Amino acid sequence: MGVARQFGAFPVRGIAAVVLALALSGCDGEAPPQGAGTGDPGKGRAVIASVGCGVCHEIPGVPGAAGIVAPSLEGFGGRSLIGGVHVNEPAILVSFVSDASRLNPGTGMPAMPITERQALDVAAYLYTLD
């Protein structure tokens, strides 16, 4: 199957393109963010609370985040997949939390009103949930 192998409706080479685009974004002389390792988990938790992720998701450590519409994010850091489809890697997660429908057309998760910096912080927080 190789490169043609599919993860849902999104081919592996499409994932590689997303990762490359994220890596090249902001090439203005400064090194671009390289995944959740550069995010701030404390700020991520605050972003999660402020944009209302807990309306749909149960999220440990976020007050009031007891949603039942979407999956619980408990243990997220130990999961192998994002959204049940994509490999759980920081660059993919950053893209997913910003606009899940770019990676999973037809998903119920809306595009979130957050910056790339905030998405890095959210990813960093989600990876603490193991």
Image (cartoon, rainbow, N blue to C red):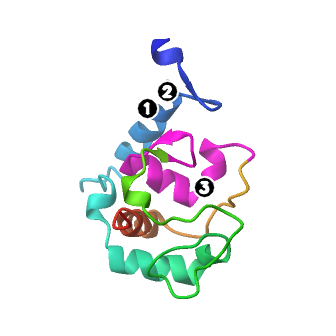
Point out the stretch of residues depicted in magenta.
Answer: 82-106
Identify the residue at image location x=35%, y=80%: 42
Q: Are marks 1 and 2 in contact (CB under 8 Å)?
A: yes
Check the image and report above or below for 129 versus 42. Answer: above
Identify the residue at image location x=65%, y=43%: 104
Picture quadrant of residue 19: top left
User: Which residue is label 2 attached to?
Assistant: 12
Q: Residues within 10 Å of mark 3 (few under 14, many from 20)?
A: some
User: Which residue is label 1 attached to?
Assistant: 16
The local secondary structure at tag 3 comes to: loop
Query: Quick one: 44 or 114, which is closer to the camera?
Result: 44
Is residue 25 something one can see in this rendering?
no
Check the image and report above or below for 2 versus 74. Answer: above
Q: Amino acid at mark 3?
A: Asp
Q: Amino acid at mark 2?
A: Val
User: Which residue is label 3 attached to?
Assistant: 99
Q: Position of residue 112 (x, y in %)?
A: 61, 66
Q: Is residue 56 left or right of residue 32?
A: right
The local secondary structure at tag 1 comes to: helix
